[in-house]
Amino acid sequence: SQKIEQNSEALNIQEGKTATLTCNYTNYSPAYLQWYRQDPGRGPVFLLLIRENEKEKRKERLKVTFDTTLKQSLFHITASQPADSATYLCALALGTGRRALTFGSGTRLQVQP
Amino acid sequence: DTAVSQTPKYLVTQMGNDKSIKCEQNLGHDTMYWYKQDSKKFLKIMFSYNNKELIINETVPNRFSPKSPDKAHLNLHINSLELGDSAVYFCASSQGTSGVKAKNIQYFGAGTRLSVL
């Protein structure tokens, strides 16, 4: 069966360090992968999209990698700040014709001052 | 201006009641969605409408009926509410394209927390 797995345990890091979150998937061949941020009591907010033919994408302090051989995406936040504390969700599109996304359960990041 | 707005934000009701959640987007998007987020935080697609036409219906009980009067609105009506329906329901929209340029970046509302007692 198809699965998307993110580390369900919270990730605690010190301010200024790099946070690395993992998204693994099985039995998918996604056309692209997206990362979202969700704060308590709010809807997810889009951060980055990476396509199957791209290895890496950057946006300010954020970096996403996509390894279709390993079936894994890594999400990095460099120089992390307490304001980065949130739950981060990865999401896959099952195909170019299908518009809904399949989400992982998210990893909660806590950045300590 | 709120891009995707859904009402109400909180909904507390008794088992067996019928309730509706409304969603509106002012982004000009052609596709709207309903997702359910359970207590374990999994966000699961329920329905998707493209230009008022139902394109995705994911094994959702037929007590749930979406209605799209126009492409800016997608409402969710739930009949005979059950305890297991308690969750946070998110509306979202996207301006999707098909093929290799597809992005389908989703814009979410703030959610409706439904509690069935």
Image: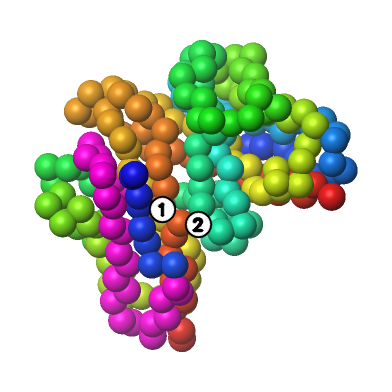
- Give the structural element (helix, strand or loop) at label 1: loop
> Dot 1, crowdedness within 10 Å: few (<14), some or many (≥20)?
many
Residue of label 2: A38
Horizontal side, residue A55 vs residue A112: left or right: left
Which of discs 1 and 2 lies nearer the camera? The answer is: 1
Q: Residue at x 51, y 52 (%)?
A: B42
Earlier sequence position, callout 1 versus callout 2 = 2
Q: Is residue A49 visible?
A: no
The spot of residue B112 in percent (x, y) is: 69, 44
Quarter of the figure that contains the N terminus of chain A: top left
Report the span colored magenta. Answer: A9-35
The quadrant holding residue B20 is: top right
Q: Residue at x 53, y 30 (%)?
A: B59
The spot of residue B16 in percent (x, y) is: 85, 35
Residue type indicated by callout 1: Gly
Chain on which label 1 sits: A
Residue A104 is labelled as 1
Q: Residue at x 87, y 43 (%)?
A: B14
Chain on which label 2 sits: A
